[in-house]
Image: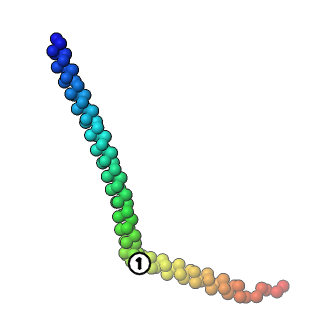
Amino acid sequence: MVHIFLILMVLGSLWLFAAVVGLVFKLVFGLIGGLFALLGGILGLVIGAVVLVAMVPVMLLAMLPLLLPVAMLAGMIWLIVHFSRKQAANTPPAQA
């Protein structure tokens, strides 16, 4: 009976040692993986921001056919308002 108990203790301690080693490996590789994921995320944000800034002129040129009529309409409205205000400011007030 003592021999069986001794064999079970040895097997149990080996299992416990393997579980602790596995836990340490999981913890270390999890931390390293998290660090690489964080670094990859930051690098992705930087590269994405550079690409987006580089694509702004291309997008503006692509949107030009859509924005040109709107810009012309806004410019005409601004000119009408601008000249009507200048004309109203230059006229003398009416005398009663």
Q: Residue furthest top?
A: 1
Q: Name the residue located 48 percent from the left edge and 77 percent from the top edge.
A: 70
Q: Position of residue 17 (x, y in %)?
A: 24, 30
Q: Name the residue located 59 percent from the left edge and 83 percent from the top edge.
A: 80
Q: Considering the image in quadrants, where does the C terminus appear?
A: bottom right
Q: Name the residue located 37 percent from the left edge and 57 percent from the top edge.
A: 42
Residue 63 visible to the viewer: no
Q: Is residue 71 left or right of residue 95?
A: left
Q: Name the residue located 16 percent from the left edge and 11 percent from the top edge.
A: 1
Q: Amino acid at mark 1?
A: Leu
Q: Position of residue 79 (x, y in %)?
A: 58, 84
In this orientation, which residue lies closer to the viewer: 14 or 86?
A: 14
Q: Which residue is mark 1?
A: 64
Q: Secondary structure at mark 1?
A: helix
In this orientation, which residue lies closer to the viewer: 31 or 70?
A: 31
Circle 1 packing at 10 Å, graded few (<14), some (14-19), many (20+), is few
